[in-house]
Amino acid sequence: MDKVFSNEMNVLKALAILLVVSGHLEFSLLGIFPPYSFQLALFFFISGCLFKEKYLHDVSTFVTRRVKSLLVPYFWYNLFYMLVTILIAKLTGKFWGMPLSFKNFFITPFLNGHQFDLSCPLWFVTQLFMTMITFLFLFRGLNAVTKNKFIHLGFFTLSGILAIPFSKLFPVTPLMLIVIRTMFSLFFVYLGYFYTHFIKDNYNIFTPKWFGAVFVLQSILWMFNRDYDPEHGIGLSYVIVWARFDDQLIVPIITALTGIWASLFTVKILYPYVKDIKFVQDMGNVTYHIMANHLLVMYIMTAILLHMNGIPITERANHDIYWIYNPVQTTYLYFVITMVVTTYTGLGLKKLHKILFPAKN
């Protein structure tokens, strides 16, 4: 993988995590794309872009590395947030999570990842692990049958498209939830692989005509948007963690595709200007830690603002985990401080890891 492409992917990861955090503050950095309309599909896409073919012949190494990079830090964070949640409960009387149990600590992370509210964005990590392991074995099986890339693309496209009606035809039990999320995400993983290997260096998909076509298509899709009105559903947005697509069938797939294209296009434009900005590269390198810690930073900021305005912290317990103080005035302050604090926290944790576990020569 060449250095420029690697750096571009890192900037794309930075953009993806910016979109996730801004979405949890209920605004979008790309206005025509509402929060939750493609952001997590973009992360799956990036994972596919970075997938190395050598792992098709070295399954044990792939699984071992995914366990070390995804699951090990996940369960350290799970322990940390269990302790934080207990502490907050003692201070405020509100337990932000599910009852403490063996199942909720070790099993629930793979079912929905919402055992502790403050770390619930990390549900994506365990799902990514399950998706990538499934992708590896399915891709190996497909390659054993045929090397035709279009048959592969058709298989994974069908998987993504069928996931949505599956959520309507079958009771969404915990296990079916995993099946639906995995089917949906597999498509975007393979799409990332397909883009890297067959499109990136062979076709220019960032011409003015492409821009115009995507803009027009997304403008048409906007008619399906419901502007966050719970009474009318979520429209362009969808909640993949709960397999909630409302009355849509194909719109979530299309808006994810247009959102991914828009993200790639944005990076193509901005890369010459941001490639040397260290903070941007740092964000891309610590997306895991930003994902893990941004709700905690927002919670602490809210507690501070409540105290400064003479409001008891118990007021925080009357709202959901995403609630922030006076959002009209403070949303962008939350956004900037959260990104700065979580990025440097992530860098600090990575340095600490290197000190405690130095790389073996």
Image: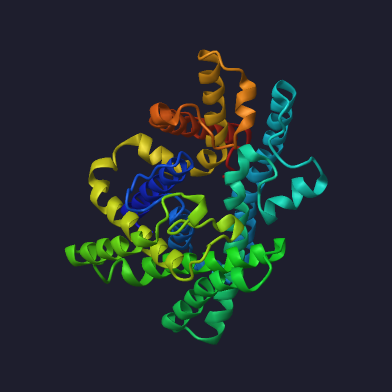
Q: Name the spot of residue 79 as percent of width and height, x first.
A: 71, 37
- Report the residue that reaches farthest toward the right: 102
- Nearer-the-camera pick, 196 or 60: 196
- Report the residue that reaches farthest toward the bottom: 145
Quarter of the figure that contains the C terminus:
top right
- Residue 58 shows in this picture: no
Quarter of the view holding residue 313: top right
Q: Name the spot of residue 259 as percent of width and height, x first.
A: 37, 58
- Report the residue that reaches farthest toward the left: 208
Q: Name the spot of residue 56 as percent of width and height, x first.
A: 55, 71
Residue at figure coordinates x 28%, y 56% from the top left = 265
Quarter of the figure that contains the N terminus:
bottom left
Q: Name the spot of residue 155 as percent of width and height, x first.
A: 50, 79
Position of 179 compared to 228: left or right? right
Quarter of the view holding residue 219: bottom left
Q: Is residue 223 above or below residue 343?
A: below
- Nearer-the-camera pick, 98 or 202: 98
Residue at figure coordinates x 63%, y 74% from the top left = 169
Residue at figure coordinates x 43%, y 57% from the top left = 38
- Nearer-the-camera pick, 287 or 92: 92
Position of 232 compared to 321: left or right? left
